[in-house]
């Protein structure tokens, strides 16, 4: 997932923490710069103590990327002993590049991720610094965030990541002007959604735009359907390796069947399998009014602000509807509680990297996130003056949610996530049946957990 994105391992043999010696060295450098005389201080410091460079890999784009750079620039100015430098990547290529770099111990000081299974695999490999001591030593820092947001980066009671941007539930976006034109009401049940699809098709409007080439946008449809049919336990029990948990169950087969029914009903644009999220392919259909709806995370609001600001007044969203007879709660959310920054265990600049992490979701940046139509996962957030309807709708959705499930391709271990994505592409291409999906996915899952008991 992107945004991550779409952009997601047991404790390492020897957990790595920020080294006290490095922390003392950094503190000494910073303290030394404060006692230098005005006449000789800056020039002497430049000759004897060059700033420590902290490299950060991320996938932000548009205004989010610009603001990240602005935040780093302000941090560098306030911390003359540290120089934070960003490198940005596209969502899907980033995942591959980071995996290779982590394996070769040549990654950046700080890398972004989604928590969950992929981060856990890096932790198992001893590639991620344990931040627990640093976080616990600074209560004001630790208490800045909503408690639940640290869940996807906490393993065995140890913290391996820090949230740095908005919480991003996945929803169904819709064009309010099109719904008004054809007298359509926001659906609360799946049959109502199916009826809307038929009405839109009768007016030659594409019901949903979908980036099938990226696969994870298709995956979110499957995960939500499984949640609405079988409840949050449908996936959570598998991720927690609970006895009897399986993909080969009626809930999952039903989810696969209903998703495939959307394909058979031509609910998506022609050729959707070739549409790529990273190049805004299906978003352009949505922004232009050729499609009426789009399954996507609320990060799409920022995308629209950058790429189609005039469309924003037409943009609304609603929760994925309930499925008749299903066990799921319509208020439950699937998505990304936040994106996270983790520190590489091989970093030679861990003390400086942690200092930068302490700056994440500061009050100024949190206010900026609100101004961009998203909600930061921080405590004591003043939302009383919010006028933006998209932001108010998110606040209301988050307040009602009793469960917030991490996106499947982040929650599961990487090997299982990739298998699920591969099968998803095949399911939406109608080249496998729902039962074949369930059987193959469960066989891979059982084999993986048996090998990693």
Image (cartoon, grey):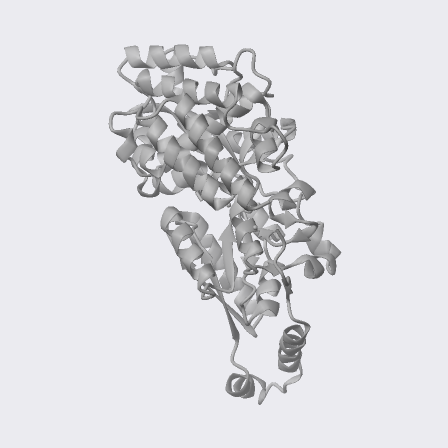
Q: Is residue 143 left or right of 214 when viewed as pictured?
A: right
Residue at 64 percent of width and 63 percent of height: 14
| Picture quadrant of residue 261 | top left
Q: Position of residue 53 (x, y in %)?
A: 50, 71
Q: So how many labels did they put on this image?
A: 0
Name the quarter where the N terminus is drawn.
Answer: top left
Q: Is residue 295 left or right of 48 when viewed as pictured?
A: left
Residue at 47 percent of width and 64 percent of height: 108
Q: Position of residue 211 (x, y in %)?
A: 34, 34
Q: In the image shown, does 118 or 288 lie closer to the viewer?
A: 118
Q: Position of residue 382 (x, y in %)?
A: 66, 40
Reply above or below: 67 against 204.
below
Reply above or below: 95 against 255.
below
Q: Position of residue 123 (x, y in %)?
A: 57, 55
**Residue 69 in sight in this render:** yes
Q: In the image shown, does 49 or 58 lie closer to the viewer?
A: 58
Reply above or below: 318 against 27.
above
Q: Is residue 129 left or right of 433 when viewed as pictured?
A: right
Q: In the image shown, does 309 or 352 lie closer to the viewer?
A: 352
Residue at 58 percent of width and 86 percent of height: 41
Residue at 43 percent of width and 56 percent of height: 98
């Amino acid at each position: 997932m992107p945004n991550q994105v779409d952009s997601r391992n047991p404790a390492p043999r020897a957990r790595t923490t920020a080294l006290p010696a490095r922390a003392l060295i950094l503190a000494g450098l910073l303290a030394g710069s404060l006692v230098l005389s005005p006449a000789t201080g800056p020039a002497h410091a430049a000759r004897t103590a060059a700033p420590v460079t902290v490299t950060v890999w991320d996938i932000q784009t548009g205004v989010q990327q610009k603001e990240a750079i602005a935040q780093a620039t302000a941090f560098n100015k306030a911390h003359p002993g540290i120089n934070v430098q960003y490198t940005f990547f596209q969502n899907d290529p980033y995942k591959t590049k980071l995996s290779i770099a982590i394996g070769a111990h040549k990654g950046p000081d700080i890398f972004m991720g989604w928590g969950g299974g992929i981060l856990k695999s890096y932790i198992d490999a001893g590639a991620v610094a344990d931040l627990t001591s640093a976080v616990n030593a600074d209560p004001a820092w630790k208490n800045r965030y909503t408690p639940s947001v640290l869940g996807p980066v906490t393993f065995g009671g140890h913290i391996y990541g820090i949230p740095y941007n908005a919480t991003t539930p996945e929803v169904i976006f819709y064009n309010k002007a099109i719904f008004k034109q054809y007298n359509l009401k926001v659906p609360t049940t799946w049959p109502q959604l199916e009826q809307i699809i038929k009405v839109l098709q009768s007016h030659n409007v594409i019901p949903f735009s979908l980036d099938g080439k990226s696969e994870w946008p298709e995956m979110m449809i499957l995960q939500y359907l499984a949640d609405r049919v079988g409840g949050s336990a449908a996936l959570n029990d598998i991720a927690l390796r609970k006895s009897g948990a399986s993909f080969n169950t009626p809930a999952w087969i039903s989810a696969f069947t209903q998703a495939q029914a959307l394909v058979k009903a031509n609910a998506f644009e022609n050729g959707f399998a070739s549409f790529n999220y990273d190049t805004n392919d299906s978003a352009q259909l949505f922004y232009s009014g050729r499609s009426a709806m789009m399954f996507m995370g609320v990060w799409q609001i920022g995308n629209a602000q950058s790429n189609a600001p005039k469309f924003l007044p037409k943009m609304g969203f609603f929760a994925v509807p309930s499925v008749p007879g299903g066990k799921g709660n319509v208020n439950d959310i699937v998505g990304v509680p936040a994106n996270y920054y983790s520190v590489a265990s091989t970093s030679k600049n861990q003390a400086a990297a942690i200092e930068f992490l302490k700056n994440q979701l500061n009050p100024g940046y949190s206010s900026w996130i609100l101004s961009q139509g998203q909600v930061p996962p921080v405590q004591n957030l003043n939302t009383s003056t919010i006028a933006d309807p998209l932001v108010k709708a998110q606040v209301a959705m988050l307040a009602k949610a009793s469960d917030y499930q991490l996106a499947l391709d982040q929650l599961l271990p990487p090997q299982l996530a990739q298998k699920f994505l591969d099968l998803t592409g095949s399911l939406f291409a109608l080249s496998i049946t729902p039962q074949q999906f369930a059987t193959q996915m469960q066989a891979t899952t059982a084999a993986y957990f048996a090998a990693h008991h």
